[in-house]
Image (spheres, rainbow, N blue to C red):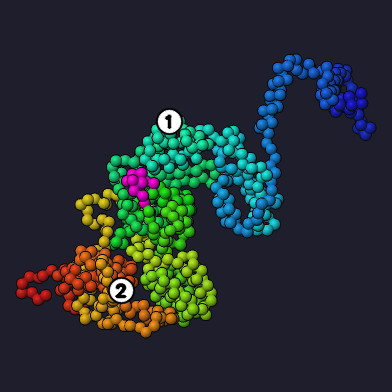
Amino acid sequence: MKHYDAILSYVCGLRSSPTTPQAPRTPGHDRQFSRVRALAFIGCVLVSIFFAMANENLAGPSSCAPLLSTSSESDEDEYKITEHTKKRRRQNKVWVFERKFITVRSAEEFIKNEKTWSIQKIHTTEEGVKRYYRCNKVKLRAEIQCSAAIYLLFDASCDDILLFRTETCHDHENSDCQSTRGINEATKKEIEKLFELRLKPKSIMKNLSKINGLVLPTKLQLNNYLKIIQNSEIPDDGHEVFVLAYEISEDDLDQNFRFMLTTKYLIGLSRQCSVLHADATYKLIWQGFPVLVIGTTDRDKHFHPFGLAVTTAERTEDFIFLFSALKKAVFSIFSYTLSCKVLVCDAAKAIQTAFACTFGTDTVIRMCWAHAKKKMQTRVEQSVQKKSQKEILQDIDALQCASTQEIFDRASEKFLDKWKAEKDFVTYFENEWLILNRFWYLGASLGTPATNNALESFNKTIKDGGTLRERHPLARFLVIASDIVKDWSNEYVINNTERRFAQLPTVSLKMWTESYQWAKLSKQVPLKNSTELVCSYRIPAGSDLDCKNYEKPWETFDEYKEQHFREWEVIMPREKENWLHGTCNCPKFLKDYICKHLVGLAIRLKHVQPPSEARAIPIGMKRKRGRPAKAKKALIVQ
């Protein structure tokens, strides 16, 4: 009864204290005290019964069990509830340290290359910030997740990033973890391969059944997926804007999207391209999203767009989406395999990596000379003595005029040897412009532009004429972008001669005049060699009338500048009609695909006749700007 008295005193609040005087009692107070005492006694009895039953349950079964469960069904229900609770019970994961990273970028790239993980949550602890990743092979809202997981610990005591991984392996391949809705990724890839072979749905289903371990789709699922592949939403009107492709990612915490707008006519232009231009421009969307523009240039160096894309970032995945969407669309609409071998861009690794992933590693990625020269000039001003800055920039310009890879490699060695005293600049120049980005010289890829200026100026027209130099919200920009793309497509009207894709360079009146005057000079043009198809001629450069023969090849960079720019070589086809297909290794031709040496030699060989306006200018005089003056009226001196 000792516990009872203590509980009774606590409940009633009447426990006596030797230091506290007690107030006198009244009859009403005694009756109230009796009722409270009775209620407290009943409560104590119930508590005692509860403790007794608990002790019996711990000891084993007893005769009191029927008081809690009066049938065998209740036992079964309790067992089921317990079993169901065990399934939902969260299991403690055992984490094992795997490796250490020095930078955040290296850690993120490592996780990204595994192509398995998505960010789940970020937790701050005393050890540091923990970034947890889950297996993205299972949907985020699936009832059962994959047991494998990792997390990055950004150590608070140092700058290291530690990677921890669970001991359990991936179990998402089990039927309980995988989603049964839709067609899985493995089946989709096989369907796409069979679709490229032009097989019908019945044949595709038959071939899928022969592959072991593949989940067969239903007939309805197959037909729906084939409609998506066939781009059935492409309009018949060649100038109507539509969404070529789009992607929306909702699994990760950092959600992203990407979509591309184009027309059927603009996609058809890609069949004529041999070189691809791609770049991102900003200050168009109020939220700060980049706008990606892709296209090509013709022989007149005019830019022709293929489409416009909006993405959340300027990453490799975004440019892979851009290139892959264009490549698939050309094949599905025109049954033409797009194979571009040259890309002209800036030094952004995201564009270069995406191009190599889409079109193969056997490609040439030309570095824009305008961007490269600006970077080189900035570095020269920072690390080279002021008295040598002008000369070293002139040497870089001379090195950029190399017409072949062999000449460029040899001249680069002589350039480094000449300026070896400038150690900082030489180290930077060798690593950045001779190893990482080496295709910035004119002869890197014949017949392709050396700069990305055509695309840069095209981006300027988008801002000036399309958005009027204002930033618009994404929803509003989608409407504006549709109008911009439609205007691009409508410019290629059949009767419009201003907007055409030039397969051959156009000879301007200024070029005709310079070529005619060059042809009238008394320069000796000896035949170097000839074949059944072409003839090669030696052209003296500058004011020289004869080609100079050097006793030995150049051994220093100064000798390279003297010998390389004293003579050019023109290769002329034997057929007169194809004289525009000839080539020259002078810098003017490598930049503009046309030069006075090629046109002047064609005039000398009587392959072509210059216009009368070109012959009207006296020899030695330059043509003035503007159109030629028309004949004035009689009796007026002209």
Q: Residues within 10 Å of mark 1 (few under 14, many from 20)?
A: few
Q: Residue at x 46, y 77 (%)?
A: 415
**Whether residue 312 can be seen here:** yes
Farthest-out residue, bottom: 551
| Amino acid identity at mark 1 | Lys
- Residue 403 as seen in the image, left or right of residue 40: left
- Residue 186 as seen in the image, left or right of residue 580: right
**Viewer-nearest residue: 22 or 174:** 174
Which residue was labeled with disc 2?
A: 569
Which numbered disc covers residue 94? none
Q: Residue at x 70, y 57 (%)?
A: 157
The verdict on residue 104 being magenta is no
- Quarter of the image where one finds residue 160: bottom right
**Residue 17 on image: x %, y %:** 92, 31
The verdict on residue 335 being magenta is yes
Which quadrant, please, contains the C terminus?
A: bottom left
Q: Quick one: SS at disc 2?
A: strand
Mark pair 2, 1: CA separation = 64 Å
- Quarter of the image where one finds residue 615: bottom left
Which residue was labeled with disc 1?
A: 219
- Residue 291 as seen in the image, left or right of residue 24: left
**Whether residue 40 can be seen here:** no
**Residue 198 on image: x %, y %:** 37, 40
Magenta span main SS: helix
Farthest-out residue, top: 70
Looking at the rendering, the stretch of residues picked out in magenta corresponds to 328-338
Q: Earlier in the sequence, mark 2 or mark 1?
A: 1
Q: Residue at x 15, y 74 (%)?
A: 616
